[in-house]
């Protein structure tokens, strides 16, 4: 079944979206999406074609996403704050045939060199028609509606760029069945009941799988309302939560840390909230304690990753509440903790998390080697994350076996940053590690060996990185060193740098 059909069973007059102070009912949204499908077909989009979405969290994104899926095409959500070079690489990597630009995406795309994305044929622009050769969104929506194109569970629905379980960023292939299965697994969890009258906070970026499927997908599948917020500001978000009667908040640790540190927020700020959860990165126990003390909320924690669509475990509604635990596996998700030989560890012993279920992805786009490294022949996803399980079945994260850096919930793989840095003419070698940061959880720190005779400053390195990488991937600090430590096999000794 096409994932876009999750809207079909809900009452016409129920509110689906609140975006830019405008409410859109399910009946209105279904009609708009049908015209979007027709417009995409009119542009020549065929089932299986990749269509990029460069847009913030708003009505434009939801319309584009469900319109693309409904037309049988593959949605490729991208960060609207990415620099042009990064957008070019991602659009070209998956052979994107069309791209839809929301208001926030126009500026980012304006500097893209179309010659670097040779497969790109159509650009749909919302609002001002300021992109050469583009088609206004209003014109796309002016045509006849088109029916939903049927898709099988194994058909590709979304490509999400991720650092993966190893290697530099690549596009994870998520099928209609993967995404729908994880939505059903979340809704089937016995810990918390999602209701049609719930209002969910949609502030987590929807180019990220957490915001896309665990927030947007779950809310729409249940027939609830989602309040879309384009950029997180602690004060305005807190005000919107009370004004719109938000009942479900899924956030990142940085959001909860920001709210907990605001002295002027009244104790009743989250009075309407039935469930509050933190994910995408580890939640500091002191933040959870402050949130409970100030607002009376017990923050649930969960664990997931893009390759699992994304939720694997959750503590939402589970009793007793164990601070620091990422909860228990969702229904239908198998989890193992294994040692270096792939054997199950004993209760209380550390092991790598392996995951299997219908929510686990089919691999990385055009990358068989990376796919084989991530998936075992019998379908287990090797996550690279280390955990322990207690006698009650609660899982606790311990460490990561991989070098992944998590900045405000976003994945940063050192290899990607290092490849950019060594392109600087004044840099001979570079190595990147994650270091603790009081606000973002982790930050990127670079160690650089200057080229012979080069004169280069820290600001030069950071500015160069910003031309090629999204801001969260750029180094916060640069250290100049005489050499980068390497092991006998030539691999960077990141532990020594840390």
Image (spheres, rainbow, N blue to C red):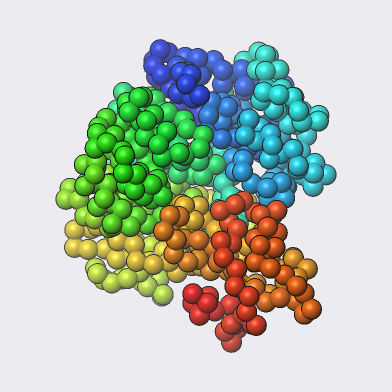
Q: Residue at x 35, y 69 (%)?
A: 351
Question: Relative to 261, is 121 above or below?
Answer: above
Say whether residue 222 is left or right of residue 148.
left
Can residue 231 be seen here? The reply is: yes
Residue 440: % across, % down = 45, 55
Q: Residue at x 37, y 30 (%)?
A: 239
Say whether residue 289 is left or right of residue 493.
left
Q: Residue at x 19, y 58 (%)?
A: 392
Question: Relative to 164, is 450 above or below?
Answer: below
Residue 229: % across, % down = 47, 32
Residue 15: % across, % down = 41, 19
Q: Nearer the viewer, residue 169 or 268?
A: 268
Residue 220: % across, % down = 42, 28
- Quarter of the rendering containing residue 269: top left
- Quarter of the rendering containing residue 414: bottom right
Say whether residue 237 is left or right of residue 115.
left
């Amino acid at each position: 079944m096409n994932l876009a059909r999750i809207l079909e069973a809900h009452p016409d007059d129920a509110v689906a979206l609140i975006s830019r102070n405008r409410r859109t009912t399910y009946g209105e949204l279904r009609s708009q999406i049908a015209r979007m499908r027709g417009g995409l077909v009119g542009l020549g989009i065929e089932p299986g074609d990749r269509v990029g979405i460069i847009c913030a969290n708003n009505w434009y994104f939801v319309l584009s996403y469900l319109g693309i899926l409904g037309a049988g095409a593959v949605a490729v959500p991208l960060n609207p704050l990415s620099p042009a070079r990064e957008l070019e690489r991602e659009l070209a990597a998956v052979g994107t045939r069309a791209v839809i630009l929301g208001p926030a995406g126009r500026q980012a795309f304006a500097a893209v060199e179309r010659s670097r994305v040779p497969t790109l044929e159509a650009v749909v622009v919302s609002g001002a028609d300021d992109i050469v050769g583009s088609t206004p969104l209003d014109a796309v929506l002016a045509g006849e509606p088109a029916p939903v194109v049927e898709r099988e569970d194994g058909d590709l629905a979304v490509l999400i760029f991720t650092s993966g379980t190893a290697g530099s960023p690549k596009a994870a292939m998520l099928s209609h069945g993967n995404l729908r299965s994880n939505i059903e697994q979340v809704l089937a969890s016995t810990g918390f009941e999602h209701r049609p009258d719930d209002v969910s906070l949609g502030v987590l970026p929807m180019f990220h799988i957490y915001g896309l499927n665990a927030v947007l997908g779950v809310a729409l599948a249940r027939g609830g309302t989602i309040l879309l917020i384009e950029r997180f500001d602690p004060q305005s978000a807190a005000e919107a939560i009370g004004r719109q009667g938000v009942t479900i908040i899924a956030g990142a640790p940085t959001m909860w840390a920001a709210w907990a540190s605001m002295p002027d927020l009244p104790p009743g700020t989250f009075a309407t909230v039935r469930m509050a959860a933190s994910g995408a990165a580890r939640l500091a126990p002191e933040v959870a304690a402050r949130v409970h003390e100030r607002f009376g909320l017990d923050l649930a924690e969960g664990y997931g990753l893009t390759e699992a669509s994304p939720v694997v475990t959750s503590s939402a509604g589970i009793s007793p509440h164990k601070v620091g635990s990422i909860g228990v596996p969702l229904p239908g998700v198998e989890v193992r903790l294994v040692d270096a030989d792939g054997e199950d560890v004993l209760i209380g012993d550390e092991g790598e998390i392996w995951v299997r279920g219908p929510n686990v992805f089919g691999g990385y786009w055009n990358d068989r080697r990376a796919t084989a490294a991530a998936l075992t022949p019998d379908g287990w996803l090797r996550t690279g994350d280390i955990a322990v399980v207690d006698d009650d079945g609660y899982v606790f994260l311990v460490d990561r076996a991989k070098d992944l850096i998590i900045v405000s919930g976003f994945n940063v793989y050192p290899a990607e940053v290092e490849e950019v840095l060594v392109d600087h003419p004044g840099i001979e070698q570079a190595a990147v590690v994650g270091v603790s940061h009081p606000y973002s959880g982790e930050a990127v720190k670079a160690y650089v060996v200057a080229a012979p005779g080069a004169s280069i400053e820290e600001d030069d390195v950071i500015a160069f990185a910003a031309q090629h990488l999204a801001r969260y991937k750029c180094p916060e600090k640069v250290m100049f060193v005489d050499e980068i430590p390497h092991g006998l096999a030539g691999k960077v000794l990141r532990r020594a740098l840390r």
